[in-house]
Amino acid sequence: MSEYVELSNLTKTYPTPKGPAVIVKDFNLHIARGEFVCLIGHSGCGKSTVLSMLAGLNEISGGGIILAGRELTGPGPDRGVVFQSPSLLPWLTAFENVMLGIDQVFFTARPEERALIAEYYLTVVGLGDAMHKRPAALSQGMRQRVGIARAFALSPKMLLLDEPFGMLDSLTRMELQQVLVDLWTRRKLTALMVTHDVDEALFLADRIVMMTNGPEAFVGDVMKVPFPRPRNRAALLDSPEYYRLREELIEFLEVRAYTLKGQTPHGGPSSPATPTSPAVGPAQPATPPIQPAVALAAS
Ligand SMILES: Nc1ncnc2c1ncn2[C@@H]1O[C@H](COP(=O)(O)OP(=O)(O)O)[C@@H](O)[C@H]1O
Ligand SMILES: [Mg+2]
């Protein structure tokens, strides 16, 4: 497996009124070129912190990140970022919003060529008929389609997605998961996506990285998702293996995310039977009381 992205002992310390808070500590992860990795963990554990350091939008306190053989030192168009909300400029059309980045990255290309790039990606994400509308005339799901088109249109070395479908209803979310996976299949971009939805992770990812609770959060476990591509959602839901992996992810979130940190789980290892709920608990306090590690309650 060729290493394309290397996060080595990545650490983030934020200053707080009570002194420095070590949010992420010695986070280690290697990603192969063309791999799709999902990062899951409880709210507040530090997922966005890791992603924003990769995006170059958040200073690295310790350790480092190498992308395609070069150490990252700041933001750049070699990383396409998709956030929960796409932050489109409201006075520009979807097409013009996508063109903004294309004009910067492909400034040597002819204007017609640049326009073709924008039209191609907007069409692939399903906005062929709506690309000349302004964001106010687009639904939230359509706006997020623009965000996805914009990220892919720059042909980045890496795609970074932070809960991109977190604000969408479940039907729209499934549609956009399909849009994303179709585009990713065409372009095979290396991707790291934060999600708190275990079903989304199992549908999209080659591997799922499970993050412990904070403070000093780290990679607690990594799951290889064995399902061949292209994946069919109905077939996945028919597979006993799907439910076994799902249980394992939920068990991590409900038990090991805590016990690996010497914390006491809330509510125990029972897992819901329906494949819809993300089963993610409340955010952790910044400095939890020190408790002895409890034995794993499930295996
Ligand atoms: N700029 C900041 N200053 C201080 N603390 C921060 C800052 N940004 C995030 N944090 C804290 O870092 C922790 C992790 O945040 P975040 O990475 O957003 O978590 P997640 O994305 O997993 O929900 C939280 O406790 C949050 O309050
Ligand atoms: Mg976050």
Image (cartoon, helix red, strand yellow):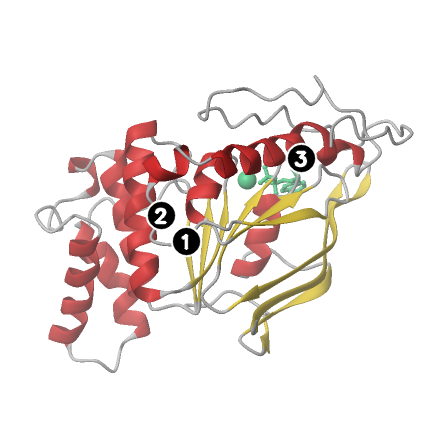
Quadrant where the C terminus sits is top right
Q: Is residue 251 or residue 244 the one in the foreground?
A: 244
User: Residue 10, image x and y in percent?
Assistant: 70, 59
Query: Based on the displayed image, in which of its 4 quarters is residue 257 positioned?
Result: top right
Identify the mark at residue 231; answer none if there is no mark. 2
Q: Residue at x 15, y 75 (%)?
A: 113
Residues under labels 2 and 3: Cα distance? 24 Å
Residues under labels 2 and 1: Cα distance? 6 Å
Tally the marks. Answer: 3
Q: Is residue 15 or residue 131 the one in the foreground?
A: 131
Label located before the other in sequence (3 or 1): 1
Q: Is residue 101 or residue 145 the one in the foreground?
A: 145
Q: Nearer the viewer, mark 2 or mark 3?
A: 2
User: Residue 186, image x and y in percent?
Assistant: 29, 63
Badge 2 element = loop
How crowded is the residue under tag 1: few (<14 C-alpha within 10 Å), some, or many (20+)? few
Quadrant of ligand 2 in image: top right
Residues under labels 3 and 1: Cα distance? 24 Å
CB atoms of marks 2 and 1 within 8 Å: yes
Quadrant where the N terminus sits is bottom right
Q: Is residue 174 visible?
A: yes
Left or right: 40 as drawn, with respect to 27:
left
Q: Residue at x 24, y 44 (%)?
A: 90
Badge 1 element = loop
Left or right: 115 as drawn, with respect to 258:
left
| Disc 3 residue type (three-letter) | Phe
User: Residue 214, image x and y in percent?
Assistant: 73, 38
